[in-house]
Image (tube, rainbow, N blue to C red):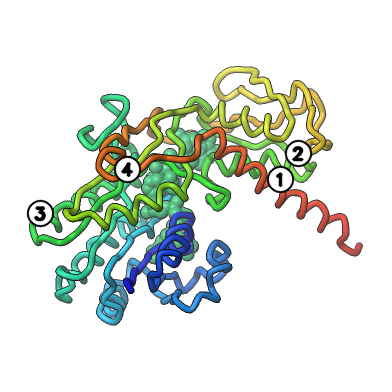
């Protein structure tokens, strides 16, 4: 029976990967931040599993990470922990580098100095943000990197340190260059979830217009469950290699807003340009949007939400993963939106009914 350590197990990907590995019969160890008791909701349903063990620690604490690896000597390490929000990285570049870049250095150094190199396989969560100012489209494993944020730069360091550990020391270390992947478990600060949660709440009269930044940004959105499957597949190869994981199609933030409206029975029309742009309700057909009226503004552009440097367009070419590992995405961006809206409408309805039944 294999064992795996997942850093970032309380996050979106960590929770799906833990489910996946437990189903495969693994013993799963998760690194959780001592301060993260409130953010364990994504793995609450797994906590009665006998083969799941949570260990407190932080990627900024090298001695803790080393002791944990010495104690567990896992077959596989999935490094998913990170400061993952691109916009926040402009405000906190040092913390972002400390966790995202040096965190990986700490893990790889520990594997090497503990003599675990022959036993422990390592997965690094690289990202399409490495491509940044893309010189070509779609982006593949051959596309040059040009990150556009402190987040992207920290992940670039992590990426090359991982590649170097393979080339210099023979570690079994792989990078998954994953394009955006979402789910009902996506953090509320990321754009897809901000839209589905915000519009679902607005449809129930629980909030006003959703403030958004760049509606023109285009992303290649897939489903997180499909993407964690590939993380495991990468560590089962005979030879360690890096792979781009993506759907190969891209859509704008504006399109995603329209889809979320449609899924709630709300038809939206966009008016105005730049920071004056809004999405206004043109008609309402769904019963689930009983609290919305024609003419109401449901999305407004907020200039403060634009980034100092933006990654305007990302679209991935995952043909290597298809060819070599038989990996294919199973959920389109449109289907993903529908699943997220359904989950967020459910939450909004519960919130409304709990407010209605609160004693005065
Ligand atoms: P997420 O939901 O934001 O989860 C991030 C995880 O990292 C959380 O468990 C968080 O713990 C943990 N963490 C943050 N700082 C830490 C620290 N100092 N020490 C230990 N743990 C720490 O992210 P995700 O979407 O699952 O992404 C997983 C990984 O894939 C990340 O490395 C991300 O950069 C990368 N990635 C994501 C995407 C995507 O579209 N989702 C695409 C490409 C790459 P708390 O719960 O305590 O905050
Ligand atoms: O959802 P986002 O914040 O994702 P972003 O920046 O692409 O980063 C995510 O995907 C990366 C993979 O490419 C991961 F590495 C990273 O950890 C993270 O998971 O923003 C998507 C786009 C951006 O262009 C942003 O400017 O949506 C635009 N956007 C427009 N309004 C917004 C908003 N993004 C956010 N978060 N909030 C807005 O109000």
Label 4 or label 2, whichever lies nearer to me, is: 4
Question: Which label sits on residue 326?
Answer: 4
- The picture places residue 211, in percent across and down from the top left corner, at 62, 36
Label 3 or label 2, whichever lies nearer to me, is: 3
Q: Residues within 10 Å of mark 4 (few under 14, many from 20)?
A: few
Q: Earlier in the sequence, mark 2 or mark 1?
A: 2
Residue behind mark 3: 167
Residues under labels 2 and 1: Cα distance?
8 Å
- Identify the residue at horizontal 64%, vertical 20% (top origin): 270
Q: Earlier in the sequence, mark 4 or mark 2?
A: 2
> Which secondary structure lies at badge 4?
loop
Q: CB under 8 Å between callouts 3 and 2?
A: no
Question: Which label sits on residue 345?
Answer: 1
- Identify the residue at horizontal 38%, vertical 70% (top origin): 26
Label 4 or label 3, whichever lies nearer to me, is: 4
Q: Earlier in the sequence, mark 4 or mark 3?
A: 3
Q: Is residue 25 left or right of residue 260?
A: left
Against 138, residue 190 (above or below) is: below
Residue behind mark 2: 203
């Amino acid at each position: 029976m294999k064992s795996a350590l997942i850093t970032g197990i309380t996050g979106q990907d960590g929770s799906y990967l833990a489910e996946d590995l437990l189903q495969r019969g693994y013993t799963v160890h998760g690194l959780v931040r001592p301060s993260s008791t409130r953010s364990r909701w994504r793995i609450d349903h797994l906590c009665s599993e006998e083969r799941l063990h949570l260990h407190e620690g932080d990627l900024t604490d090298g001695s803790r990470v080393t002791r944990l690896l010495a104690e567990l000597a896992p077959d596989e390490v999935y490094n998913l922990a990170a400061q993952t929000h691109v916009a926040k990285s402009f405000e906190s570049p040092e913390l972002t580098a400390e966790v995202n870049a040096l965190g990986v250095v700490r893990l790889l150094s520990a594997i090497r100095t503990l003599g675990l190199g022959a036993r422990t396989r390592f997965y690094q969560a690289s990202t399409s943000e490495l491509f940044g100012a893309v010189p070509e489209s779609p982006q593949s494993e051959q596309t040059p990197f040009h990150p556009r944020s402190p987040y992207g730069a920290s992940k670039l360091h992590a990426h090359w340190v991982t590649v170097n550990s393979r080339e210099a020391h023979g570690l079994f270390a792989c990078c998954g260059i994953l394009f955006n992947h979402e789910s009902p478990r996506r953090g509320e600060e990321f754009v897809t979830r901000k839209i589905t949660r915000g519009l679902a709440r607005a449809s129930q009269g629980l909030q006003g217009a959703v403030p958004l930044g760049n509606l023109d940004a285009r992303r290649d959105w897939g489903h997180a469950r499909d993407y964690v499957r590939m993380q495991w597949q990468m560590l089962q190869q005979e030879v360690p290699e890096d792979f781009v994981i993506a759907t190969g199609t891209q859509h704008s933030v504006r399109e995603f807003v329209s889809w979320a409206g449609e899924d709630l029975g709300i038809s939206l029309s966009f008016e105005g340009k730049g920071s004056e742009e809004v999405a206004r309700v043109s008609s309402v057909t769904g019963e689930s949007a009983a609290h919305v009226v024609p003419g109401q503004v449901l999305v407004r552009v907020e200039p403060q939400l634009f980034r100092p440097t933006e990654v305007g367009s990302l679209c991935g070419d995952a043909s290597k993963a298809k060819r070599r590992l038989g990996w294919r995405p199973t959920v389109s961006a449109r289907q993903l939106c529908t699943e997220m809206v359904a989950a967020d409408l459910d939450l909004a309805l519960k919130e409304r009914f709990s407010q209605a039944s609160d004693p005065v």
